[in-house]
Amino acid sequence: MFKSLIGFFSTDLAIDLGTANTLVYHLGRGITINEPSVVAIIHDEYGERRVLAVGHEAKEMIGKTPDHISAIRPIKDGVIADFSTTEAMLKYFITKAHNRKSLIRPRIIICIPSGVTEVERRAVEESALSAGAREVYLVEEPIAAAIGADMPILDASGNMVVDIGGGTTEVALISLGGIVIAKSVRVAGDKMDEAIIHYLKKKYSLLIGEKTAEQIKMTIGEAYPSEQVNTMDIKGRDLIRGVPRTIKVTSEEIREALQEPIRAIVEAIKATLEKTPPELAADVNDRGIVLTGGGALLKNLDLLITKETGLPVQKAENPLLCVVLGSGKILDRFDQLKQLLVRR
């Protein structure tokens, strides 16, 4: 009852502002929003832009809009690519989290990739303030992901987390509440989708959209060979004849298509391991690597990383939710965990 009362009166939010999805944690209530980071914009005859839809509704419009409507993903490679659209999206999610009460000005924690520049950090802060936040705090995604995965990052021991999102992959070694070594590569779920689109275009002269590529990745995508070969019917446009066409593809083909982005992720992990101090390397050898983020759900990715590194690898219990749950825990225990926030 006490917790529900806190949730009723509190306005504080933790936001995982992702390239693919935005998740919002409301203090005292838990995760209240999990929607695609997509905004549909309508352009009127005077050249003015107006928000038509945000989230699920906007994502359904991707690839299907007439000339005067555009479905935009304002976060590119983990950072803001379109400031005004990001502001409109944040304003929508903040208002929705507070049941359309637009006068509320919450304190907000937002997750950012570990490799962002000072300019990119400032863009996130200013966007959230313009969207109605009272105070804005930033936390690096690997820290939030590790907390969300229940890793003991405050201990004097090495904890390695690999957070594979939509736009970036964050590899970090964490000890005593801080990042010892980190590598951020702008290769993740989106690059996997692009690789599938390019592969089918080159091999079959078939053009498919982002949504179809994502479905293929989730349904039969794999990083390492499985015992059984799976197949899937794919619909797209024949680039030679210009008509709709259906083909059958196998999981082996999709594994081949995904080789380049997966290789980049594995190399980032190896590069981080090579720089790991000996004492912490011993901890990583014992505890292994924890995978978080949507990319962790790619079939057999843990097996591939184990084969390449020789270390035990496990997926977090809720890979998609780790970052927002971790930032939510910082919000819940703000006074004890505020040292984990990005220092200004």
Image (cartoon, helix red, strand yellow):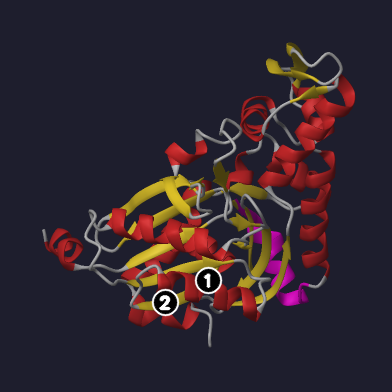
Tell me what residue is drawn at x 48 percent, y 76 percent: 126
Residue 323 x/y as whole percent:
50, 58
The quarter of the picture where residue 331 lies is bottom left
SS for dot 2? strand
Q: How far apart are marks 1 and 2 (CA)?
A: 9 Å
Tell me what residue is drawn at x 58 percent, y 45 percent: 294
Magenta residues span 276-291
Amino acid, disc 2: Val
Residue 55 x/y as whole percent:
44, 44
- Which one is earlier in the sequence, the residue at label 1 or at label 2? 1
Q: Find out whether residue 287 is within the magenta segment.
A: yes
Image quarter hosting the N terminus: bottom left
Residue 282 x/y as whole percent:
72, 68
SS for dot 1? helix
Residue 112, numbered label: none
Q: Find out whether residue 98 is within the magenta segment.
A: no
The residue tagged 2 is 136
Q: Please state which of residues 128 and 329 is positioned toward the viewer in this rendering.
A: 128
The residue tagged 1 is 124
Q: Main secondary structure of the magenta part?
A: helix
Tell me what residue is drawn at x 81 percent, y 73 percent: 275
Residue 161 in the figure: left or right of residue 5: right
Q: Please state which of residues 98 and 126 is positioned toward the viewer in this rendering.
A: 126
Residue 150 visible somewhere in the drawing: no
Q: Is residue 198 above or below residue 27?
A: above
Contact? badges 1 and 2 (CB < 8 Å): yes
Number of residues whose C-alpha sits closer than 10 Å to that of mark 1, classed few (under 14), some (14–19) or many (20 or more)? many
Residue 307 in the figure: left or right of residue 144: right
Toward the bottom, the furthest residue is: 344
Amino acid, disc 1: Val
Residue 333 x/y as whole percent:
33, 73
Residue 326 visible somewhere in the drawing: yes
